[in-house]
Amino acid sequence: MSEWPSTIIPNGETSKEKEDEMKKAKTVELSPFDKRKQISAEDLEENGESSLESGESIAMVKVVEQAILEHEKYNIKPKKVILIDGNRCYAKDIAYRFGDDEEESSGFIPLGLARIAGYLDKHKVPCSMVRLQDLDNSTKEKDILKLVIEADIVAVSSLSPSIGGVFSALKQFKELNPKLKTVLGAQHALDYEHIVSHKDETNIDACVIGQGEIALTALAYGVPDNQIGNMAYLDETSEATIIKRNANYPRLTEQAVIASELMRPVAAREISIEWSHTVVPELAKIYPESIVTESNSGCKHPCKFCTNLRMYGTNCESTLETSESEIKKGLKRAQQLKQDILIYFADGMINTSDEHLEAIVSLMTRENASNEYKAVWYAFTSVEKEEDAEAGCDKKAMRLGKMARQFEAMSQSGCVMLAFGMEDVVGDRSKQGKGADLERAIEVTDSAREKILVRLLLIMGLEDHYNFSRDEIKERTLSHMKAHPQAAYRINSWTPIVGTSDFDKYHNFLTRDVRKDPEAFSEHDTMHGVIDPVKMYDSLGIPEEQRWVKDPKDWVVLRNEIMQEYLRSPEHEAFLETLKGKSINGKENILYDIAVEFRRITLTGIEK
Ligand code: SF4
């Protein structure tokens, strides 16, 4: 269960007296919004599903629909909105800098903002998209500040490493335009209690959790804050200042909830080429043109290190219809450019169900068949727990046969690479909230590599790992990699992410608390915060002589050593040979070329 306080007073402290006083001042009904915040992997295991209720989405949608119709009827203009991508290029873990061409890229494509922009366009809301990094360019800065002066609402999307820059930019914006309403979305907004109760420092009036399309449309059409389900803010009008508890939960679903043509989702606004970040460097060399899309939101797994759980619970909602129009637009651009493109599915997992995966495969097969210039695609996928994983030979053979057919169909439809979160090959993988054990995960990833390139993600520096010596970790990781060679192994250092149950559990192990001290990010090479090895060893009771991690960077050094040894091993070389001659969309040797490019980029990145 979350350790976060259930009530907040302005200085961020919670006292028993104050809590009692607040209870008297206002009875607070726990809403799906708050229930979702409290979800932990343990809760889900114990209680089953999370608490999202589609009926509440419908209610919220009706409120917004009504507001739009009223504005049209009385010819009232909606408010002006600026959507800001707050992520900065410098805010990346060293693992993300393997690419030698990534200095100009934050590595995050603001699909969420682009989808909100598409939605606001549909509803005729004046809306601009800007990047915070462009404030560093004096010409662009002037244009941005002009927009700020004229705007009513600024909505920023940001992950934790960039949040310090967001807070200070918003301070400047509010000085220029004191009436501006400022809203934060994306992962760091999960820290909403601290953010909105410290408005004087953060300069943020409200946080939006999960999808922002309906919330932003509602704000633009003057819907009062207390009717916007997934928004958190301070109720400064009440006697006791508390974070508002709302009852509605708007989630933009396509089929089940939104029957209304008016509210139906639309394709993302096209992002300018300047904004197209390098997410997968080894593919970017070969496919310089790419688009990002998402065929479903949410993920059914409760991984402890991921923010998905608190954003959406374990509910997945299809956004395939929206995705289809984005893919068609992308392929149209490919025909104009006369070159193949890459489609990056930003889904938490593409295989939410066999049916969903089949729909993607048939969509991509159809689109590629009807276009001269084709799309290859890349997606995250997960390993599902099979009830019969322990079954005898016949069932295993059937399972492998089915997987082989699925991967073959994906490959035929243009799937060039799949990312799997293997996470832990040193300790116990299932402790991360993954359904399937290591053996089952290997069965799937080994099967995938016969047809498609696999990008296998490992995490280094998990709590369990402090129990092992440096040599043991190196030996276990390398033996796994050599026994199951893949085109692209990525090993990231573990640090708890704001808004996850990991963060609740381990934030006292950080060298500095990044929520209250965003500048901590600038001193460490990390995505999320830095674990203090002394605190971790102390809590595990590991004797001094066994403590080999002296500095958090020791994990990065070990990771680099492992990557170098693996990529230069005869096992990896032999694996590369097996890729020769394989093709995707008729492009001969493409898998081999990409794998070799990954090796070049990674070794160059480590050794420069
Ligand atoms: S499978 Fe991936 S997207 Fe889903 S919860 Fe785990 S890490 Fe997050």
Image (cartoon, rainbow, N blue to C red):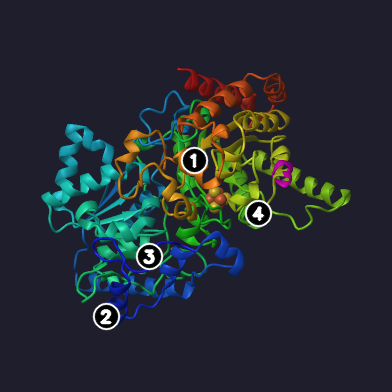
Name the element at disc 2: helix
Q: What residue would you read off at disc 4? A: 435
Which residue is drawn at the image coordinates 26% and 71% (left, top)?
Answer: 224
Kind of residue at disc 2: Ala
Q: What residue would you read off at disc 1? A: 331
Q: Residue 580's spot in the image, x, y percent?
A: 69, 22
Front residue of 500/453: it is 500
Q: Is residue 129 visible?
A: yes
Q: Is residue 527 above or below residue 227?
A: above
What's the mark number on residue 5? 3
Q: Residue 450's spot in the image, x, y percent?
A: 72, 34
Q: Is mark 3 within 8 Å of ligand 1?
A: no
Kind of residue at disc 3: Pro
For marks 2 and 4, give the CA distance.
Answer: 44 Å
For marks 1 and 2, give the CA distance.
Answer: 57 Å
Front residue of 515/77: it is 515
